[in-house]
Amino acid sequence: MTIEIAAGQQRDTKRWGTVAVIVGCGVAAALHVGKVPIAASMLQATFGIDLAAIGTVAGIFAVLGLFGSIPAGFVIAATGERRVLLCGLAAIALGAGWGALAPSFWMLLASRLLEGLGVLLVAVAGPVLLERLVEPGARAMTMAVWSCYMPVGIAMAMLAGPYFESWRAIWWATAAIGILLFALVCAIVPDAAPQSGPARTGLFGKSAALARQPTPALLTACFALYSMMFFAVFSFLPILLTERLATSGRGAGLLSAVAAAVNIAGNLAAGRLLARGVGRGKLIALASLVMGASALGIFLPALGGWGAFLLCLVFSATGGLIPATLLSAAPAAARSAAMVPVMMGLLMTGSNLGQVTGPIAVGTLVSAWGWSAADIVVVAAAILTGLAAWALAVGDRDGSRPLTG
């Protein structure tokens, strides 16, 4: 009996070590999202670009994810998630290295597309791997932990970025981290046989049918709108805080890192609330409305710099409830294990749509009319998210689109 208990503990330790490596891959991917805001002033000095162009550097990163997330889910279902995860890490490292050598702004944009492909593959393959490796009773909390990868990566980038002498050094550092995670996945994460024969038959037709169903569509829309709100704020937060508080780049980086980090609390809180039976629609609706109200004070000058920063903390912490809630709903919405990768691809399509449109829209509006104009994007997205969440809650109540189980 003692030997069996020890063996079980050893398996659990190995399993959670594997989970840590997979979450680490997500964090490594998120570094490529957070490095642009903290390097914005360096990029402006090198290429002579405005905030609209910075928004493009941040947003174009997600273009491949916008069009490739669903195909990525299909590929994962057919070939195996570990292989796709490794391909994603390789693309991240290559894209960052290419960007570090970029002689022009347009070459930098092209390298960001390759980085975006890598982040897309990691973001879709990571949760599918976790769903396979973790016991059913621990999946809700595991997905909540996974959903922390984005705020953790952004916070790390904003905290460490100001200590680099140039943006090129930041790009090289993120490439090295991608290579390190590639090696760890090869050594630690177990492989699984890809689906074949009957399991693979009809995947395309089933994927198309899934995308047309109301619940997957609503979940995808919620992720798109959340991502639009989040990146509309955090893509420009270091610059906003530098202007409002007259602080240094390091000071703005530290404050931005703190604001990003509190998003983790919301993600973890969502895991606990969902385990206690709180409705997903209610959580999403509440969080979106608080985010919209907070954005009014963040971008309007009435509350001053420190008031805007405090509202950033509220915005970020409350917003963290949304991604964990959406990711935990994916298996139930997919209705079968074979469709989970495709459902994750749908969610990442929404996430990347928000990452593309949010920074570009806000950068354009702020360049033309000032910071207050950014409220148009965030408040409109918050209202639409609340409506989509209400539709999800109605489906939960009448049983027509259940997300439990």
Image (tube, rainbow, N blue to C red):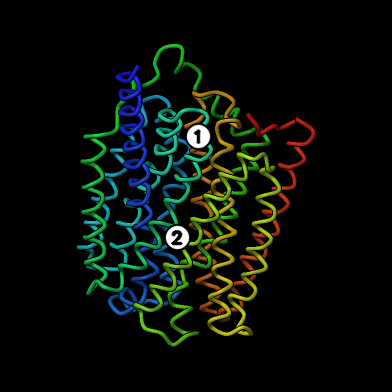
Q: Is residue 402 left or right of residue 17?
A: right
Q: Is residue 329 above or below residue 145?
A: above
The local secondary structure at tag 2 comes to helix
Q: Disc 1 residue type?
A: Arg
At a point 32% along the width and 50% down the height, the residue shown is 114
When asked about the image quadrant of residue 98, the answer is bottom left
At a point 56% along the width and 79% down the height, the residue shown is 371
Q: Is residue 255 left or right of residue 394?
A: left
Residues 205 and 319: in front is 319
> Is the N terminus in the top left, top right, bottom left or bottom right quadrant?
top left
Where is mark 2, residue-wise?
59
Where is mark 1, residue-wise?
139
Q: Disc 2 residue type?
A: Gly
Mark 2–mark 1 contact, CB under 8 Å?
Answer: no
Question: Is residue 389 something one can see in this rendering?
Answer: yes
Identity of the residue furthest to the bottom in this view: 246
